[in-house]
Image (cartoon, rainbow, N blue to C red):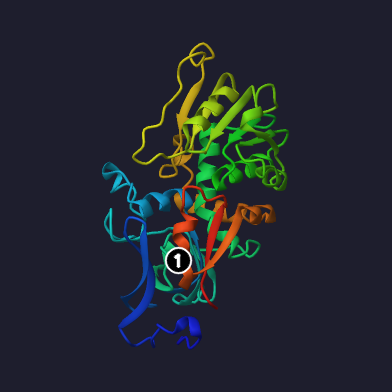
């Protein structure tokens, strides 16, 4: 198939081995640019697919660290995205939330909208087992949240949440919102979203959860929780999460602080209340599920869960691919108030 649309302006006929496409690169602290790069167009043979990107998602937490050049050297290998180009700190082609349409490849995949862990790039080639078809009931734009949904699902498994539990989520960002959204579907669960911003109350309502300002948690429904999830990546948020935990409760720490060492407030009543502080990281499926769950199965479930339209509330910004160099500094700024940002590639 030869694309002649405007979005395929860098796309050349199938028989030409050398082609060009455009991708976003982080080139220095707080500097990005769109670069034209060569790639092997001679694909769609065997089990390869060629994908035209429709949407990509900016992972605000992780990509902020990349943008600022604050990925710890000790994490250079573990932080590599599956299809990253270049090495930390710079320059790197980085990203892992891509939704596109298969233009060439196995007949069963041609024309399908698929999710992959590919950076921000217009066209690309992958082995077919590295893309996953998006369920028909999940819109392509919303599917860019799949990687975040995987993280949320993994954290809920780590927290061993059950029916009727009182669940508090500290930090009403994308990850916290997804956790609250999933937990609100558990029978009998009492879910409270806690944040410093009063405007997050509307988000909590969309996700069918209660809302409490962090300054007003004392005596509220957020306290004496059976399970607390912390997602704010702040020292104050961690303190709030511990304050919300009931006796013998678990606090699941889902924040990643990069090279910064947070203050973990483990004094006062932490020990007498016999609290558990547990880490959760999407890179490994919890041991009690690893025998049955593959990463592909987990991703497929994440895409299926995103069929719920309430998660549209987590996408608050849309930017055209060509506008990324000017938009990224504000999207990844420390004082940004929005949630998920999606990148639109012209049809």
**Residue 150 location (% of width, % of height):** 51, 48
Instruction: Report if residue 116 is visible in the image.
Output: no
Residue at horizontal 66%, vertical 62%?
Answer: 137
Instruction: Report if residue 181 is visible in the image.
Output: yes
**Residue 66 location (% of width, % of height):** 36, 53
**Residue 145 location (% of width, % of height):** 55, 55
Residue at horizontal 64%, vertical 22%?
Answer: 224
Residue 200 vertical placement versus 216 (above, below): below
Q: Is residue 285 left or right of residue 39?
A: right
Residue 283 vertical placement versus 264 (above, below): below
**172 or 207: which is nearer to us?**
172
Q: Looking at the rendering, which quadrant does residue 175 occupy?
A: top right
- Neighbor class of circle 1 (other Cα within 10 Å; few <14, some 14-19, many 20+) is few
**230 or 27: which is nearer to us?**
27
The residue indicated by pointer 1 is: 326
**105 or 180: which is nearer to us?**
180
Q: Is residue 264 left or right of residue 146?
A: left
Residue 217 vertical placement versus 205 (above, below): above
Residue 167 vertical placement versus 298 (above, below): above
Residue at horizontal 33%, vertical 47%?
Answer: 70
């Amino acid at each position: 198939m030869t694309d002649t649309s405007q979005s395929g302006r860098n796309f050349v006929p199938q028989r030409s081995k050398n082609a060009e496409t455009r991708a976003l690169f982080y080139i220095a602290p707080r500097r990005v640019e769109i670069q034209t790069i060569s790639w092997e167009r001679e694909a769609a043979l065997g089990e390869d697919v060629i994908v035209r990107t429709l949407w990509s998602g900016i992972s605000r937490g992780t990509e902020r660290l990349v943008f600022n050049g604050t990925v710890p050297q000790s994490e250079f290998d573990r932080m590599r995205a599956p299809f990253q180009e270049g090495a930390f700190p710079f320059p790197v082609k980085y990203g892992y939330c891509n939704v596109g349409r298969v233009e060439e490849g196995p007949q069963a995949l041609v024309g399908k909208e698929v999710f992959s862990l590919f950076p921000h790039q217009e066209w690309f080639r992958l082995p077919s087992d590295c893309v996953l078809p998006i369920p028909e009931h999940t819109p392509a734009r919303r599917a860019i949240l799949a990687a975040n949904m995987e993280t949320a699902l993994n954290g809920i498994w780590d927290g061993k949440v059950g029916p009727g539990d009182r669940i508090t989520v500290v930090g009403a960002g994308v990850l916290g919102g997804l956790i609250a959204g999933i937990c609100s579907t558990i029978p009998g669960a009492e879910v409270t979203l806690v944040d410093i911003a009063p405007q997050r109350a509307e988000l909590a309502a969309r996700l069918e959860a209660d809302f409490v300002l962090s300054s007003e948690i004392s005596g509220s429904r957020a306290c004496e929780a059976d399970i607390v999830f912390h997602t704010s990546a702040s020292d104050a948020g961690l303190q709030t999460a511990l304050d919300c935990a009931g006796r013998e409760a678990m606090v699941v720490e889902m924040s990643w602080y990069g090279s910064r060492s947070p203050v973990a407030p483990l004094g006062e009543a932490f020990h007498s209340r016999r609290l558990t502080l547990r880490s959760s990281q999407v890179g490994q499926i919890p041991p009690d599920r690893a025998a049955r769950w593959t990463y592909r199965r987990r991703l497929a479930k994440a895409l299926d869960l995103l069929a719920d339209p309430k998660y549209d509330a987590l996408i608050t910004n849309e930017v055209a691919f060509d506008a990324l160099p000017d938009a990224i500094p504000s999207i990844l700024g420390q004082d940004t108030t929005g949630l998920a940002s999606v990148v639109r590639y012209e049809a």
